[in-house]
Amino acid sequence: MPTEVLREGSTIDLFVMELSIGYETFLNKSKENGQTIGHGLSQEELQAMLDNVKGKKEGNASKNS
């Protein structure tokens, strides 16, 4: 309950509440304007990027050994 958070919440509780309300407002306005939220990358593209980074880290680890 918002009134309970205001009455008994810590600073972090208030920060999280304000952040969540702001994000919800952002999503609602974006939807009203017809904007899509996202990064425009597919799951496969993201996985390939992650695999590439992991491969570079593993390659560096073997060079440092």
Image (cartoon, helix red, strand yellow):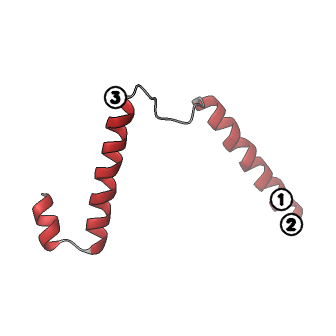
Mark 3 crowd level (few <14, some 14–19, many ≥20, 10 Å Cα): few
In this rendering, which labeled residue sits more in front, label 3 or label 1? Answer: 3
What quarter of the picture does the C terminus occupy? bottom right
The residue type indicated by label 2 comes to Asn
- In the picture of the structure, the residue carrying the numbered disc 3 is 32
* 5 left or right of 59 in image: left
In this rendering, which labeled residue sits more in front, label 3 or label 2? Answer: 3
6 lies above or below 62: below
The x, y position of residue 10, in whole percent, is 24, 74
Which element carries disc 2, helix, strand or loop?
helix
- In the picture of the structure, the residue carrying the numbered disc 1 is 60
* 14 left or right of 54 in image: left
The residue type indicated by label 3 comes to Glu
37 lies above or below 13: above
- In the picture of the structure, the residue carrying the numbered disc 2 is 64
Image marks 1 and 2: residues in contact by CB distance under 8 Å:
yes
Q: Quadrant of residue 52?
A: top right
